[in-house]
Amino acid sequence: MTSSMNTPKRWVWMSLLFLGILSLGITSCDNDDDGNVDPDDGQQVDSGWLIGSIVLGTNGNSFYLGAFEEIPSTYGTAELEKSTEIGLGTRLQIFGNNIYSRDENARTVTKWKVDRTTLEIVPEAIMSFVASGYSGRKPAVFLSETQAFFQDLVNGYVLEWNPTTMEITKTHNVTPLDLPPNLDPFSGPFSGEARGDKIYYPIRYLIQNCCDLPVVPFAKVAVFDPATSSIEYIEDTRALGGMANSFMVDENDVIYHRPDRDNSWMRAFFNVDTSSLPTVLPILRLNADGRYDESFKIDLNEVIPDIQSIPQVQFVLDDKMVFTYSTYKFDAFDDRNQMYNTDFYKTVSLDLNTQNVEPFTPFDQYNSISLQGKINGSNYFSYTCQEVI
């Protein structure tokens, strides 16, 4: 398992969030020992590393983004000063060779470009979605260089925009998501997964008040077809809903719908014995058409007796899922955040075919590891921590 996964330690120990690699040009350039481009030689870089940092402040958190030809050996104030401040309350996405930031307060999307000589990051275009009514709280799903989508399924629409021209092109009116009573309006999909010309959204359920949920929500996926402006909601009654931003995709593009923190919290919302509920911590699999594979289901409560919640799922590879779970059992709803106490964490590798569980130790020294994506076929992860600089 570990031999097929590349986990270079040159990045995981740094006090930053690694975002990805971006192709910046076609020729190489000279750089100093810290991986910085010499802006006086006029040459362009071949490729570079984008490094994002969150600075905690009294007025909120500010996000910085820097481009480096090589990963710096250290990261602190000097590297931060070479970065561009993206703004307060922003979220970043990368699609193709472009960087997009979403400002939830201003309700805008900014397209950024990297100067291939100086590696300076500058804004290229700004798109506002204020007039559309969209809140800006959820990320985009990109189908192509000319098609991207924001969704608000609770209110029954999907907003289409063009990432190249930075214009809103269409509002798709769709069947609204029917939520059970007492659910937070922010329930519904958070992000989605593009497949061919369609988008699959995992549905999540957020509760407003403890222990007052009269209807059991089941696992659900929304399949959106932009060509027909139609959406289909597909439910699986074998599993309890609450599965948040929870698609995991293996190296063959097979989608697994896995549990998240909300599944564990969900148990506290029912004044019933948990054993009477559907599977609380399930792993399900989607067919190519977005429907659940009825021949596949793993109940993690059965294969891991001491599991209580799943703070993180790192990756799926070679028919194995590596994830971190907590053994902490909270008896009161107000005690639920103890699931983030790393003293109770265990990381394991689950064979999705045999359901055999084995300890997974490469991440033991890090308490917050998550998969960021693939570069040249290798998995890259981020280690998030806080440091005063």
Image: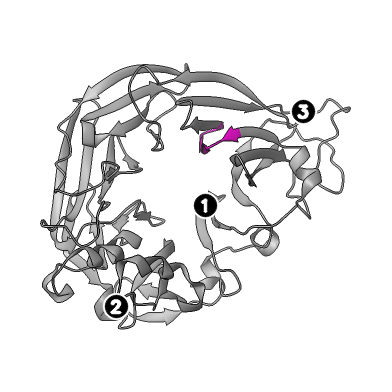
What's the residue type where badge 1 is placed? Answer: Gln
| Lower position in the chain sequence, tag 2 or tag 3 | 3
- Spatial separation of the CA atoms under disc 2 and disc 3: 52 Å
Residue 108's spot in the image, x, y percent?
47, 24
Q: Nearer the viewer, residue 359 or 385?
A: 385
The magenta segment is: 87-98
Q: Does residue 349 appear left or right of residue 223 in this picture?
A: right
* Residue 69 included in the magenta stretch of the image: no
What's the residue type where badge 3 is placed? Answer: Thr
What's the residue type where badge 2 is placed? Answer: Thr
Residue 234's spot in the image, x, y percent?
15, 47
Check disc 1: other Cα within 10 Å, few if <14, some if 14-19, many if 20+.
Answer: some
Corner quadrant of residue 339: bottom left
| Lower position in the chain sequence, tag 3 or tag 1 | 3
Q: Main secondary structure of the magenta part?
A: strand
Q: Does residue 18 appear left or right of residue 280 in this picture?
A: right
- Residue tagged 1: 372
- Spatial separation of the CA atoms under disc 1 and disc 2: 27 Å
Residue 388's spot in the image, x, y percent?
72, 55
User: Considering the numbered disc 2 on the image, is that residue within a helix, a strand or a loop?
Assistant: loop
Relative to 277, say whether 180 is above or below: above
Check disc 2: other Cα within 10 Å, few if <14, some if 14-19, many if 20+.
Answer: few
| Closer to viewer: mark 2 or mark 3 | 3
- Residue tagged 3: 117
